[in-house]
Amino acid sequence: MQKFDLLASFDTEKYHLTLGGFYPSTHIKYKYLYVLSCIFNLFISWSQFLSMATFSYFNSSNLEKLSEILLFCMTQFAFLNKLTNFVAQKTSLMKLEVMLQSYLLTNVTQKEIDVLENHIKEGRLLAKVYRVLCFLVVLFYALFPFLDDRSGESHKFPLPCWFPFDEIKYYYQVFFMEILSIAVGAWINSNIDILTVMMCVLATAEFEVLRNRLATILQPLSTSASIAEGDALVKTKLRDCVNQYDELLCLVNQIEITFSKGIFVQFFCSVIVICLTGFQMIVISFNSMQFFLLIVYFSCMMCQVAMYCWYGHTVMESSDKIRDACYLADWNESDLIVQKSLLMIMERAKRPAILRAGNFFELNIPTLMKILRSSYSYFAVLQRLYGKK
């Protein structure tokens, strides 16, 4: 048996969120720097959101302009809610770290290490794709005001916002602050998303490790010199499996407590964002730079929602397969105590571990389909209203 560091799987996200001032830090020496970073990031993000919300109010009668600003405004709203929930759940986050350092979860064989590493590699690969999409969104927002000549304006900004001063007079300062706000939002938001996904990846991998342990739990009976010694080893392994199963169920529950409220707001806003992105793509020219920006933005939003639903679904599926693992064990060769214990595990496994968003939506593939259907329904309504005008 070897000790496997589960916390290392999200070291990158932890480091970035600590730099942003949002992850609980143990570095007392840099405490004030983290606090200043947190205040600065919150100030610039809230300022951007309030500026866009004010612009939306003054342009509520223009459907095309309103959809353009609400597109990013809803994304910013979801990000700020997710960030607020993340900061409020610091205690729960620390509990998650403690759970992931449990002896039963971290002491594994070489074969089990391979299982854990394969799952983590898959999660990291998706994280890289998501980060690239976020980077491209920021890059396109920075470039399209200079490359897109659809309006003929000489001074265009990445986002339409309201300012209590003449923004053209301070064009470069305002332009820089808008891009900085977009970059900060993409940076922090992506790290919170990937951190949540990596937690789901670890839960899925640990369920698979448990499944393999249960399927081979009766091997000591065939390898031990005496029946009594084999029975003792089997009962010890079974007790560890039961405790590990309880810890995994608590882990999934703690993941839900920590992130579910933020995910709920994200799902609600994603329906609107996907709808508005599709609407914007049909009302602007296909040859414009903004159209390519919207394609990248749409891909990023889809990746974000799909990540949550896909990995929530894998957690549910992996926990559901615990029943099969108990049945595949040669239970007919064990004594009555072991058979009863396996039966109790199977009964509990009939109710799989399910992650929910705000106790309303389950994180699974059917929920993803519901989000897409809802987005299309609102898109059809907007298209019809725009056609009448």
Image (cartoon, grey):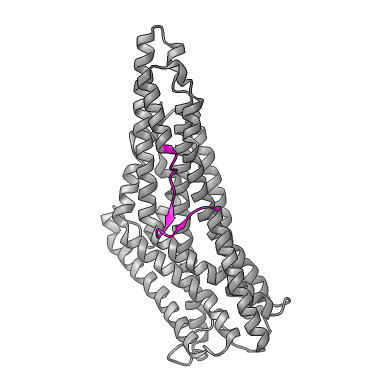
Residue 66: x %, y % from top left:
55, 83
- Classify residue 235 as left or right of residue 28: right
**The furthest residue to the left:** 28
Residue 279: x %, y % from top left:
63, 76
Q: Quadrant of the N terminus?
A: top left
The front one of 184 and 46 is 46
How many marks can you see?
A: 0
Query: Which range of residues does the magenta coloring cover?
Result: 349-365
The front one of 71 and 8 is 71
Please report the residue visible at 33 percent of the width from the left and 70 percent of the height from the top: 39
Asked where in the image residue 98 lies, by quadrant, the reply is: top left
Residue 372 position (above or below residue 149): above
Residue 102: x %, y % from top left:
33, 37
Query: Magenta stretch mostly in which secondary structure?
Result: loop
Residue 204: x %, y % from top left:
48, 42
Tell me, yes or no, whether the highlighted magenta stretch contains residue 355: yes
Tell me, yes or no, whether the highlighted magenta stretch contains residue 226: no
- Classify residue 23 as left or right of residue 381: left
Q: Is residue 341 visible?
A: yes
Residue 259 position (above or below residue 103): below
Please report the residue visible at 37 percent of the width from the left and 25 percent of the height from the top: 340
Asked where in the image residue 143 lies, by quadrant, the reply is: bottom right
Q: Quadrant of the C terminus?
A: bottom right
Residue 297 position (above or below residue 356): below
Residue 367 position (above or below residue 231): below
- Classify residue 95 as left or right of residue 218: left
Please report the residue visible at 53 percent of the width from the left and 48 percent of the height from the top: 124
Q: Is residue 110 visible?
A: no
Please report the residue visible at 52 percent of the width from the left and 78 percent of the height from the top: 70
